[in-house]
Image (cartoon, coloured by chain):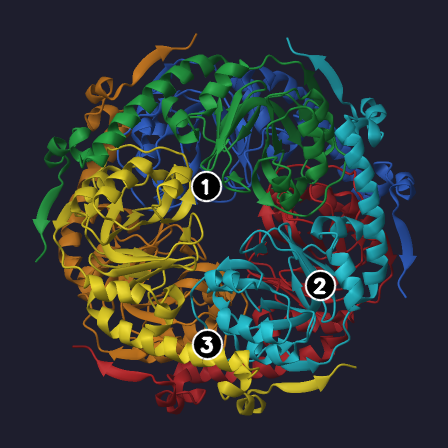
Chain colours: A blue, B red, C orange, D cyan, E yellow, F green
Amino acid sequence: MRTVVVTDPPRADAETVDALAAHGVATVHEAMGRTGYLGPGIRPVHLGSRIGGTAVTVLSWPGDNLMIHIAVEQCRPGDVLVVTTTSPSTDGMFGELFATALQHRGVRGLVINAGVRDVAELHAMGFPVWSAAVSAQGTVKATPGAVNVPVSIAGQPIHPGDAILADDDGVVCVPREDVPAVLEAAEARAAKEAATRAAFRRGELGLDRYGLRDRLPAMGIEYVTWS
Amino acid sequence: MRTVVVTDPPRADAETVDALAAHGVATVHEAMGRTGYLGPGIRPVHLGSRIGGTAVTVLSWPGDNLMIHIAVEQCRPGDVLVVTTTSPSTDGMFGELFATALQHRGVRGLVINAGVRDVAELHAMGFPVWSAAVSAQGTVKATPGAVNVPVSIAGQPIHPGDAILADDDGVVCVPREDVPAVLEAAEARAAKEAATRAAFRRGELGLDRYGLRDRLPAMGIEYVTWS
Amino acid sequence: MRTVVVTDPPRADAETVDALAAHGVATVHEAMGRTGYLGPGIRPVHLGSRIGGTAVTVLSWPGDNLMIHIAVEQCRPGDVLVVTTTSPSTDGMFGELFATALQHRGVRGLVINAGVRDVAELHAMGFPVWSAAVSAQGTVKATPGAVNVPVSIAGQPIHPGDAILADDDGVVCVPREDVPAVLEAAEARAAKEAATRAAFRRGELGLDRYGLRDRLPAMGIEYVTWS
Amino acid sequence: MRTVVVTDPPRADAETVDALAAHGVATVHEAMGRTGYLGPGIRPVHLGSRIGGTAVTVLSWPGDNLMIHIAVEQCRPGDVLVVTTTSPSTDGMFGELFATALQHRGVRGLVINAGVRDVAELHAMGFPVWSAAVSAQGTVKATPGAVNVPVSIAGQPIHPGDAILADDDGVVCVPREDVPAVLEAAEARAAKEAATRAAFRRGELGLDRYGLRDRLPAMGIEYVTWS
Amino acid sequence: MRTVVVTDPPRADAETVDALAAHGVATVHEAMGRTGYLGPGIRPVHLGSRIGGTAVTVLSWPGDNLMIHIAVEQCRPGDVLVVTTTSPSTDGMFGELFATALQHRGVRGLVINAGVRDVAELHAMGFPVWSAAVSAQGTVKATPGAVNVPVSIAGQPIHPGDAILADDDGVVCVPREDVPAVLEAAEARAAKEAATRAAFRRGELGLDRYGLRDRLPAMGIEYVTWS
Amino acid sequence: MRTVVVTDPPRADAETVDALAAHGVATVHEAMGRTGYLGPGIRPVHLGSRIGGTAVTVLSWPGDNLMIHIAVEQCRPGDVLVVTTTSPSTDGMFGELFATALQHRGVRGLVINAGVRDVAELHAMGFPVWSAAVSAQGTVKATPGAVNVPVSIAGQPIHPGDAILADDDGVVCVPREDVPAVLEAAEARAAKEAATRAAFRRGELGLDRYGLRDRLPAMGIEYVTWS
């Protein structure tokens, strides 16, 4: 691993990211052609938040949070800190002291493919976290890693400056250069979903709305009455 | 797999199912001789609901929600949709648009041995869900499966029309023909539990109430004082 | 296994345990030199509680809660019941009837390396539980085990009378004889954390506060500008 | 659970089962329309066996092998013992003494959704086992279950007398009444596979053989040259 | 954690350990009253070995093998190295260079609750390993731990000098002071098993040999003929 | 997802890849600064192979092997097929017919982050496989994906044409452009390991060879005699 801290990567445009965040993780994931999702293993510690921001990425050694200390300094208002480890770990690498420092810098939340602790305090101070685990297990500050390099969670690449959106469905990453196009696609999808929602409320069926009914016989699906 | 949609299976009697639902999952599971439980892997997405209804069953290909679209049309007021896949999957096969369509038809909730998404929206609209995962990962509508065939979750067979009860402890399935007898057994058990609860509040011990104390020596259990 | 019930083990001093509990699991774990934590697999069923007490330990056969019945009688005000099984199990060994009996005796909560049920009722009655699973699956009372013997959860030994502290971060065990020293260490750590919190609120960085910045070059960490 | 031992269930025809076994698990699973597979969680303890036989089913309490003792007596030459538990367990419920008794009765192997032990000895005596775990953890004989009732593993129902086929790919169950038809389908599939194998050896592509190439544009798949 | 290296702990008597090892893990576990087993999560990397020796214990930080380097020096002929980590890790902490050093010192094998690598080379050189994982992921030498302190794997305490027995069923630990008594109990059990084996070969049933048949009606087990 | 097939990506130089393969996965992973490893979840189906080749990558829908059919045509002698899915799946997407087609084209093996089947046949024909699961569960050919796009397994990016090395320790990916430098580093490391091996065979300790002994006091590690 190249033990490097990359400073001042370009960020996705803040206003566009904010507009995108309003659409929610599932809609944005669909708008990207069903890509970008960090998987069901990264969950909100508390339900009820929805945030968007730009990624500052951290690659840490398991059981070691040295690189998070370094990353704090690289954070700006509107960022989301994204942390992963070089091999799987559930240790509690992040707690309320880190959150205090990040809130001071205007960071909107944490996405971590490892553990967090002080979760009652994090909730009380309004700092939202999406993590792979909750664990009180403490860590050391002994082994180097990297900040603002490309990382990958659940098969999904994340580059510094990418848009990170998170809500109760989990986390999605939108590549920086795609943010404007994805916003457009998300708005189109949201409009379409609104129309479908209205139709479903009137009793229309997806079977008809999506033109599925006529395709069923060719798929070999037959209807039989209970006997 | 026979790719079939079975229409109009007989349902367990709605009133009896409602009476049964009041007893809660753990009591009904005990009343059935400790059977019918769908296991600790199926959890409520939000705590605090308790429902009962009759099963409409769906067997889907992983990553594909075509059969849920077909199943919506087979649902009636008082049903609970029960979905499983032919091999393990965490994909988000179900979201708020489906829930909108099901609420229109009077469906009481969803039990799914896979993933759901839009969970903030599902909670806001009051549509309770028990699932194996929360995932934004979207699905296609390409591969056939079956509706209203027998399925199995965690070793527990579920037939269309069976009673499905769900609360914070998970989900239990009561075979349609057993519903009246299980209601009787659940009422008997609830009465017994009420008496035990009262006794425990007075300080009686299970050791005495269940006649265990006298059996301990034969089991080889000895009491020793700390030294 | 020696099938034994040890009566009247000495307990950690109640007042010291209460003082320790106020510091929270993560702080106490750090104060013990990062030991004592029961791991991320033991989670609160409901978020929002923080308790402390003295351990009454139970070693049960999987699928069998006989020994919990025996253990109830050994509990005193200020205890926390700690249950594990001889091999991994998720069965719902504990429910609201047990909680009723324990509340009568002044027990403060349950830590169980297996499943619990009646979790809505447990929450309503204010009996906090930390468990490895929620499961309605019932158990029998057929096979002996032990009460108040040393047990181990997630590699952490727990002796009867040890201090058990639990909150939203999980559970930590403090050996009985170490409780006074750990309280002192926890108070020192809390004071240090308060100073750090204040510094971070003013914008100081951990990188500087912990003297890390000067050590980075020796670790081979280099800063590069994005290109 | 009804604690019952069903005697003398009808078995699938032995000769047909033997003919079917020759085709291997994957081919038979395909011949059944991709059903009947007990999932990737049931694995051979040692690679290199391929067996077929008729199911004697056992439903046991976790950590308890009483019902296996009862089931031995129900076994006949050509049977395969199929064991599952009422809740998940990895305990070593079966070892070489059981295998000795079963070999005496002409039983061909064991399929168990739990643990086995003495696996070196089982291999030495030529008794093949497919299991969810290997574990030395011993069990008791205290709690009743059932023999020759329908059970379910990985969502797959298994009835006494069904054909059980097992090889390095795992285990498949063929319902007793379907055995002749599945044999026919398996033979047809094997013939088709032989032709495909010969074609592939000559360099033909599946893309052409299965008529996929023409469908790719409609699926939106485009070919682009590396740039 | 106290970062300490304890030198020259007393070992269980070598000859008695060797006699015990001949009985195999499952038999010794039973002879100890079904205790001492390190669980199904610790598996032989290659099947076919059976060893016994005295424990040198190591407690390491995850992703860090510094303490194994220290432990090598503490090993004597007849020892087995037993390694665990302060939180779960699958990293490859041990490879053929360590095995070369240990073979030079007469160490009989490795038991590790984490990962190993160079497994082809380990097999070629005849150094048997039981581990929680195989992983090429390398580790650092940065964070202290402890050697020859009590550790715990799968709820089982292990002290330096305890007897460690390992075969294809996994690993069992016998407390040093219990080794002579456990050898006696294992010999008694082996004799009993030999008699049972002979009886089973003659066709006797466990149902009769263990006196179970008469107890079945009281357990509520009834026999019914297939209908 | 862009449903695309990229043709003729540049490959790492075949001879250099072959030279690299001789060093084994663990050594190459170390030579890359402890990067590139696909994690302990990808295991050889049979132990005893060591291969190297250039990646043809496949991104498939779960339960669907359409894209593998397309990928076969893109394979050349010296390639290794690398398959992953858009969400986790254990289905048996690959069997001996595919292996027959790939052997015809000179492909050296398969790395798949999902399931394989026909594993006895694959072994018999000498086609080595590293996979996340073995499963007979069949798949469909209905949903598009991509061939020769960047994919990621266990946080490790893999580009078409990268060098893939696999042995009993798992799989490592070396970026195409880094192959010559990594070969050099691997040779240097192998030489160093040979010297260390010789030293360890003479009884030298890692503690001394790596200069660790003098650093122990500063780390707070103390030696104490057993008391």
| Amino acid beneath label 3 | Val
Mark 1 crowdedness (10 Å alpha carbons): few <14, some 14-19, many ≥20: many
Where does label 1 land, which residue? A132
Q: Is residue B178 above or below residue B120?
A: below
Chain letter for the residue marked with disc 1 in the picture? A
| Amino acid beneath label 1 | Ala
Image spot of residue F30 (x, y percent):
36, 26
Q: Quadrant of residue A60?
A: top left
Q: Is residue C212 above or below residue B121?
A: above
Q: Quadrant of the C terminus of chain B?
A: bottom left
* Numbered circle sitting on residue D140: 3
Secondary structure state at the residue bearing disc 3: loop
Task: Name which of mark 2 and mark 3 comes first in the sequence.
Answer: 3
Mark 3 crowdedness (10 Å alpha carbons): few <14, some 14-19, many ≥20: some
Where does label 2 land, which residue? D157
Q: Quadrant of residue F145?
A: top right
